[in-house]
């Protein structure tokens, strides 16, 4: 607060530009204050006001699922808004927790769960930096899991031969039934049969890469 005192008039009103309470722009602003006594004598003074952006952007992630079966679609979106800069483009990455591998991905991320290539935990990482260099970070962790229904679905989707898919799904159904009865040895034997059947059809009814995925996913059942 600026103030002025005159030897004759005592306290003299002070007028400042920009006025007290005004909104200041980012960066330095020079405030000029003037006081005039009853005799018309005027005094002027200045001081600088520096406004800095100290608030990072508000970064949000759309709600995803904690657990994605391998036949599900993953959809996660990161957006950021700054009170000064407005909309800020975030940067996003995906980390496979088991290996520590980090890859850059779109911030409007959409992918088939099976396309990640491995079961386990993943973390979607997002960061946004405003024009003042203030950074906000957010993350979302999810798990890609194999279930009997999801592996059966992929078997049917990926097989070029309906009869092959039907036979392999029947084996999976038997394995699941054994699991429900807590006959774990029988379940393991049926899964071994499933893997052997898929391997035999690799490069035939199944693309070799997808056959390898089916076999890998079956170990998560």
Image (cartoon, rainbow, N blue to C red):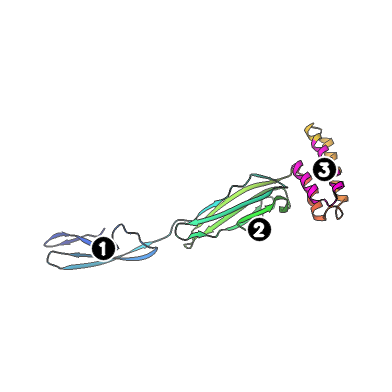
Q: Nearer the viewer, residue 138 or 168?
A: 168
Label 1 secondary element:
strand
Check if residue 24 falls in the magenta segment.
no
Tell me the SS state at disc 3. helix
Please state the horizontal and vertical placement of residue 145, each as a whole percent of the image.
71, 45
Task: Let me know if residue 161 is in the magenta part.
Answer: yes
* Mark sitting on residue 169: 3
The residue that appears at 55% across and 56% down in the rendered structure is 127
Does 71 appear above or below 83?
Answer: above
Q: Label 2: state its secondary structure.
A: strand
Q: What percent of the width, then of the height, locates residue 37?
A: 15, 64
- Disc 1/disc 2 C-alpha distance (Å): 55 Å
* Foreground: disc 3 or disc 2: 3
Asked if the residue under mark 2 is in contact with the one under mark 1, i.e. CB atoms within 8 Å, the reply is no
In the image, farthest residue toward the right: 200
Residue 60 sits above or below residue 84 on the image:
above
Residue 86: x and y in percent read 48, 59
How far apart are the two marked residues, 3 and 2, measured between alpha carbons? 34 Å
- Count neighbours of disc 2 (C-alpha within 10 A) and say few if under 14, some if 14 to 19, many if 20 or more: few
Mark 3 or mark 2, earlier in chain = 2
Q: Are marks 3 and 2 in contact (CB under 8 Å)?
A: no
Q: Most extreme residue toward the front, as rendered?
A: 162
Q: Which is closer to the viewer, label 1 or label 2? A: 1
Q: Nearer the viewer, residue 109 or 35?
A: 109
Badge 1 crowding class, 10 Å Cα cut-off, few under 14, some 14 to 19, many 20 or more, is: some
Residue 37 higher or lower than 148, as above or below? below
Q: Which residues are magenta?
A: 147-176
According to the picture, the residue beneath numbered tag 1 turns out to be 16
Q: Residue at x 82, y 43 (%)?
A: 169
Q: Which residue is mark 2?
A: 103
């Amino acid at each position: 607060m600026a103030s002025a005192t005159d030897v004759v008039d005592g306290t003299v009103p002070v007028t400042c530009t920009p006025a007290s309470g005004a909104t200041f722009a980012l960066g330095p602003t020079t405030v000029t204050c003037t006081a005039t006594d009853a005799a018309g004598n005027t005094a002027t003074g200045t001081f600088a006001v520096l406004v800095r952006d100290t608030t990072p952007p508000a970064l949000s992630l759309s709600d995803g699922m904690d657990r994605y079966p391998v036949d599900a679609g993953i959809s996660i979106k990161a957006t950021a808004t700054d009170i000064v800069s407005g909309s800020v483009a975030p940067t996003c990455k995906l980390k496979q927790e088991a290996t520590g591998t980090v890859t850059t991905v779109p911030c409007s991320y959409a992918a088939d769960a099976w396309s990640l290539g491995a079961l386990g935990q993943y973390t979607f990482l997002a960061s946004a930096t405003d024009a003042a260099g203030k950074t906000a970070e957010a993350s979302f962790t999810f798990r890609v899991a194999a279930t009997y229904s999801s592996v059966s679905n992929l078997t049917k989707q990926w097989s070029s031969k309906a009869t092959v898919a039907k036979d392999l799904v029947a084996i999976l159904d038997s394995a699941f039934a054994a699991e429900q009865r807590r006959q774990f040895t029988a379940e393991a034997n049926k899964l071994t049969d499933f893997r052997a059947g898929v391997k035999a059809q690799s490069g035939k009814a199944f693309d070799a890469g997808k056959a390898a995925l089916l076999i890998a996913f079956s170990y998560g059942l």
